Image (tube, rainbow, N blue to C red):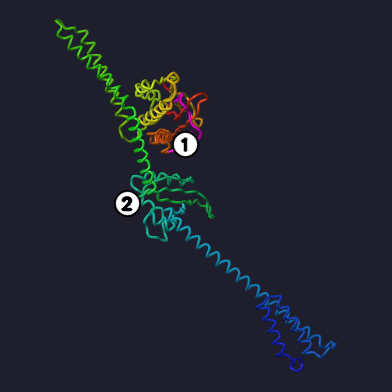
Amino acid sequence: MHEYWPSTPYVSLLLCATLFTAWFGGQGPGLLALGLSVTAFYFLFLPPLSADASSLPRLLCFGLAGLLVTMLASTQWRTTQSLRRAKDELSAKVDALRRSENYLAAAQRLSHTGCFDWRVATDEVFWSEETFHIFEYEPMAKLNLEHYLRRIHPEDLALVRQMIENARKGNDFDFDHRLLLPDDQVKHVHIMGHAEMNEAGELEFVGAVMDVTEQNRTQDALHQAQANYAHITRLTTMGEFAVSIAHEVNQPLTAVVNNANACLTLLPAGGPAVTEVRDALAEIIDDAERAGTVIARVRQLARKAPAERKLVDLREVIVEVVALARYESATRQVTIQTGMPAGLPPVLGDRVQLEQVLLNLVVNGLDAMAEVPAARRFLLIRARYDTQEDRPAVTIDVQDTGAGFAPGQLERIFEAFYTTKPQGLGMGLAISRSIIEAHGGRLWAETNAGPGATFSFCLPAAGEARS
């Protein structure tokens, strides 16, 4: 064999060259190297231009060996390249996943929102880092529902257990409750969970927990600010009606004094005029009660107290406001007409706040007619049956015959601090709208077909109509 293959060392070198070329370069470069190697083998190790058939086996064997080496090496090269690409892709995905986890963790920290997974069958619970932070637990590998229940405020524990039992039936949940932490700190959290079946066919919930403690404090502060503004608006309105109030109180007080003087005159006149004295005393009582009613009405509107939710007859609200505005309307030579059909259902709300809204609309109507000739000054206050979202409701309209709205005013009149009055605060209509919306209703304004404008507010009915 040594004599037959005197070129063995050189052939090995050529095969190695083909192998390494295919290994590092792939199939294309490997086949090129194989072609060059076969050509070199033919010219270097076979007789020149030999056509001897005995030389063909050597050339064929070398070519097949080189082809096999090339195929094996190129296959290895492709495998290596594929593994390298897979590694790079996996590394990129791991980096992206790590970045996503970092972004998610940062977003949860910033929004005070954590996520959780609850497996109902075993009561195993899995929390994100922010969820541990909200409940003030150190991160732990094994967690169950009992760890969650330990942090529930005792006053909310019954509610939470009820929600858990309802969730075990496969119902989603969305509710608020409080946490009582070891340092006696109280947190308010909002819990949301969505039910789904896992691969094992078991019920589990994926959800989020949000720390809303600070939000509740912004919201409480906002409500307090709105209440303060509403109180200021009431006091401002009462200031505008100071003359009217003084007149309303002065009339019965004057009558009380006159009747008392009459009694004094009747008593020493030789014989007691019992009937006349009794009548005078009755009038004194009536007038005193009238003055007391006016004072009570003023104190009610001026007081600062939490909102109440009671059944309110809007017809009575209209009567009270018209009585309060009676002298002012007479002074401004405005005729107030009312329309209050029987059978209107009551609404659920705060009587003082609703009187404040109506009084503000009446004041605006009186102001709007300041430049209108006296013969045309009419203010119509009308209550009517209505519907809101296909449910029974009551609407009150306050229609004036004033100047109406200038271009662009109708879109802005409910904005805070926007006013058309020289001495106005620009808060009356904004506060009125917030009060009506807090009662589940809506307040709006329209331009009349004739002169003036109409302000209306609609409130949902609270129950059966009453006559």
Question: Which amino acid type corresponds to the residue marked 1 in the rendered image?
Answer: Arg
- Image coords of residue 322 (percent x, y): 37, 23
- Comparing marks 2 and 1, which lies closer to the viewer? 1
The earlier-in-sequence mark between 2 and 1 is: 2
Residue projecting furthest to the top = 270
The residue drawn where x is 53% and y is 52% is 201
**Residue drawn 36% across and 45% down?**
156
Q: Nearer the viewer, residue 425 or 55?
A: 425
Q: Which residue is mark 1?
A: 412
Q: Report if residue 143 lies within the magenta region.
A: no
**Of the pair 409 and 53, the residue shown nearer to us:** 409
Q: Which mark is residue 185?
A: 2
Instruction: Place residue 50 in its image quadrant.
Output: bottom right
Where residue 463 is drawn, which disc sits there?
none
Question: Label 2 is placed on what type of residue?
Answer: Gln
Pinpoint residue 410: horizontal percent, then vertical percent.
Answer: 49, 33
Question: Among all residues in the image, which is located at the extreme bottom?
Answer: 3
Query: From the viewer's perspective, is residue 85 above or below residue 202?
Result: below
Q: Which residues are magenta?
A: 398-415
